[in-house]
Image (cartoon, grey):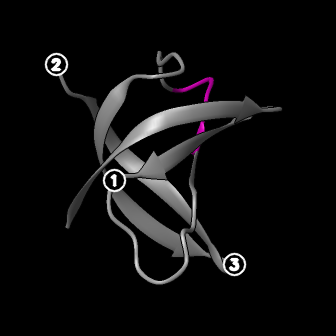
Amino acid sequence: MKHKGQVYKFVGVKGVIRPDKFGQVRVDVLFDRHKENLVIGDKIEYEQVEKNRRKYAENIKKIG
């Protein structure tokens, strides 16, 4: 399932995506910043996978 969000910040080797839609609690999505050429504020579309109670983005595609 494709999700949309925006790159929010970078922490160490990980980047953080703030999703456009979330449930009762917002859970940020992580991605490896060295594999993707993204900057803060980029709108993206991604698939999310849950590993060890954290959500990670895969198949990231920049929108616009």
User: Circle 2 — which element?
Assistant: loop
Q: Helix or strand or loop: what does disc 1 sit on?
A: loop
What residue span does the magenta drawing correspond to? 31-35
Residue 49 lies in the magenta stretch: no
Who's the residue at 62% across and 23% down the image?
Answer: 34
Give the alpha-carbon distance from disc 3 to disc 1, as whole Å. Answer: 23 Å
What is the three-letter code of the residue carrying label 1? Asp
Q: Does 64 appear above or below 43?
A: above
Q: Is residue 62 left or right of residue 42?
A: left
Q: Quadrant of the C terminus?
A: top left
Q: Is residue 59 above or below residue 10?
A: below
Residue 20 circle label: 1
**Residue for badge 3:** 52
| Label 3, label 2: how far apart the Cα atoms are | 32 Å
Q: Residues within 10 Å of mark 1 (few under 14, many from 20)?
A: few
Q: At label 2, which amino acid type do we have?
A: Gly
Mark 2 = which residue? 64
- Counting residues from the start of the chain, the first of labels 1 and 2 encountered is 1
